[in-house]
Amino acid sequence: MIAAIIAAAGSGERFGASIPKALIQLGDRSLLEHAVSAISSVADQIVVTAPAGYEEQIRALVGDGITVVTGGVTRSESVRLGLAAISGADFVLVHDAARALASKDLISRVVKALQSGDVAVIPGLPEVDTVKVIDANGYVSATPDRATLRRVQTPQGFSYSVLKDAHAQPADATDDAALVANAGHKVRIIEGEERALKITTPQDLTAALQFIGSADSFSTGVGVDAHAFAEGRQLWLAGILWPDEVGVGGHSDGDVAAHAICDALFAATGLGDLGSNFGTSRPEYAGASGVTLLKETHSVISRAGYSISHVSVQIIGNRPRIGARRAEAIATISQALGGAEVAILATTTDGMGLTGEGKGIAAIASALVIKSA
């Protein structure tokens, strides 16, 4: 099992913000939402360390399937508190919400290196500037060979037991790799990426915007779908079959997550909605799978000159429990949408309404698309 800790307890002081840094907006989403979206593609369990007083706000943002704990005064303390919420993991990824744009490819490469036998893996970029070491009086005391230097990034990946042992003592460090190395373990550095920059100042935010494009080319949409449970039907949700669960009624397979995403994409592009494209007037779509509708939607918007930057869907219901199959569902939907970045969250309604009373299931999706020039 792969677990992930997202350190999000930092203040926005250096940014000049009155809210925690993880809640600062980058494009259509907060830094934290960007980080969760990327890491959820590989992690079976995600723990977010939140600033004191912001726990409920962050829980509402990330959904019930993600564990939120109160972070500590230092980064190392926050990671220790996050580790305490994890059990049974093989590997742990430690990520900074401030490195919001680290890609799924980078995260996957960290995991692959761990699965190949390394116990500690971190991404890094070559140092291109000449670096000087200075003494207490400000005079140069050494000039390291920059060929041997790397600018370290996150996510950093570790064997769960190695990271837990490294944090057994209340030591502090600017990154977890230092603690692991001090404990006598070898730390592998793999190639990092420029888009995984640390967003600490308004200037950093401006630099990050180059990786998500010009705001003028983006448009967004929201989609909603809900279906009542129906005995005798299989439950298809987020593109995958959930055995031993009662399905829902509908013209197609009733996949509320897929349907909400389709509607969000149509809303963002102004190309109709789920009903006008695949409704009862189109008998060829009777019983169609959610994956089929996602592929058809992707085809429709692509022909109109749009590409998908990101889709996010929040599934609302008492069951099934999404967390254990989140990565599988994300991979299925992403493949149907041509490899698009996908986030899946889940929540309940505390016993209220159709979903809370256990009568059905619903989903709300948002989509960010780019119009080709």
Image (tube, rainbow, N blue to C red):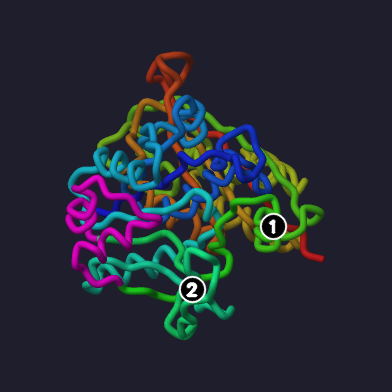
**Amino acid at the residue labelled 1:** Leu
Q: How many marks?
A: 2
- Position of 197 compared to 161: left or right? right
User: Residue at 40% of width from left, 55% of height from top?
Assistant: 174
Viewer can see residue 370: yes
Residue 276 falls in image quadrant: top right
Q: Which residue is mark 1?
A: 209
User: Residue at 61% of width from left, 45% of height from top?
Assistant: 14
Give the residue at the far front of this rendering: 137
Residue 249 against residue 26 in the figure, above or below: above
Q: 328 and 104: which one is in front? A: 104
Highlighted magenta segment, given as a residue range: 159-187
| Dot 2 or dot 1, earlier in sequence | 2
Q: Which residue is mark 2?
A: 133
Asked if disc 2 and disc 1 are in contact, CB closer than 8 Å, the reply is: no
The location of residue 36, given as percent across then percent down, is 47, 47
**Amino acid at the residue labelled 2:** Val
Viewer can see residue 278: no
